[in-house]
Amino acid sequence: MRITVLTLFPEMFKGVIDESIIARAIHDKKVEIKIINFRDFSKDKHKKVDDYQYGGGAGMVLKLQPIVDCLKSIKTKNSHVVLMSPQGKQYNQTKVKQLAKYKDLIIIAGHYEGFDERIIHYVDEIISIGDYILTGGEIPAMVLVDSITRTLKGVISKDSLESESFNNNLLDYPIYTKPLNFEGHKVPNILLSGNHKHINEFRNKQRLIKTKKMRKDIMKKGK
């Protein structure tokens, strides 16, 4: 899979793609990640990419020309283009799995006040990571890069992925490690029994209890 991010701040992505699981996935050729500065496509002599909005109003608006020209230079018939915006549909694990199926994913990360509205004619979908406002689309784009890459075949073990939160509309079961007793908080005895059937039953029950307590909303989605 190839993921390309269009941004004005490519340096922000270094820590994400040069470390940990994603860096290993790139090294092992499980994914190809490119970060492109769409300012390089500006035809303005000062490489300006934004301007005042028609009708008046606060903030600068990203111009179409640099983004669209950048997009046209890399887009193929297999490309799926995502625009990061708080106005989009909210991101979730189901969408992660859908996006992971594309061979060529292009993510546009905006900045400043936002995009010229006509950008919608050049993208396939608009995605939001939540109902709040950030200074730009770089962090939301990083969320997509991370969440999608880790689901690709061979990046993380299949068993780990299957037991994670949101599978079957449930949170993950509680997990523990040493010491057995920390300030009076003890590891459940069942996990020390060696009886894997009983352990699995315990964990499945705990998933239900935990989800009902903390995220009833995702249980309702599964009905």
Image (spheres, rainbow, N blue to C red):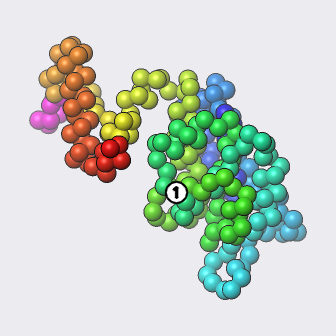
- Above or below residue 161? Residue 107 is below
- Mark 1 lies on residue: 89
Magenta stretch encompasses residue 201: no
Q: Which amino acid does the dot numbered 1 rest on? A: Lys
Furthest-bottom residue in this view:
56
Left or right: 178 in relation to 76: left
Residue 188 pos. (x, y %):
16, 27
Q: Is any atom of residue 127 visible in this view?
A: yes
- Quadrant in which residue 207 is drawn: top left
Q: Nearer the viewer, residue 1 or 175?
A: 1
Q: Residue at x 46, y 58 (%)?
A: 130
Q: Quadrant of the C terminus?
A: top left
- Quadrant in which residue 40 is drawn: bottom right
Left or right: 10 in relation to 213: right
Left or right: 179 in relation to 96: left
Residue 176 pos. (x, y %):
26, 30
Furthest-front residue in this view:
223
Q: Residue at x 37, y 29 (%)?
A: 163
Region in magenta: 182-187
Residue 44 pos. (x, y %):
86, 69
Q: Residue at x 24, y 41 (%)?
A: 210
Residue 215 pos. (x, y %):
29, 48
- Quadrant in which residue 76 is drawn: top right
Q: Nearer the viewer, residue 196 or 191?
A: 196
- Above or below residue 178? Residue 128 is below
Q: Residue at x 74, y 39 (%)?
A: 78
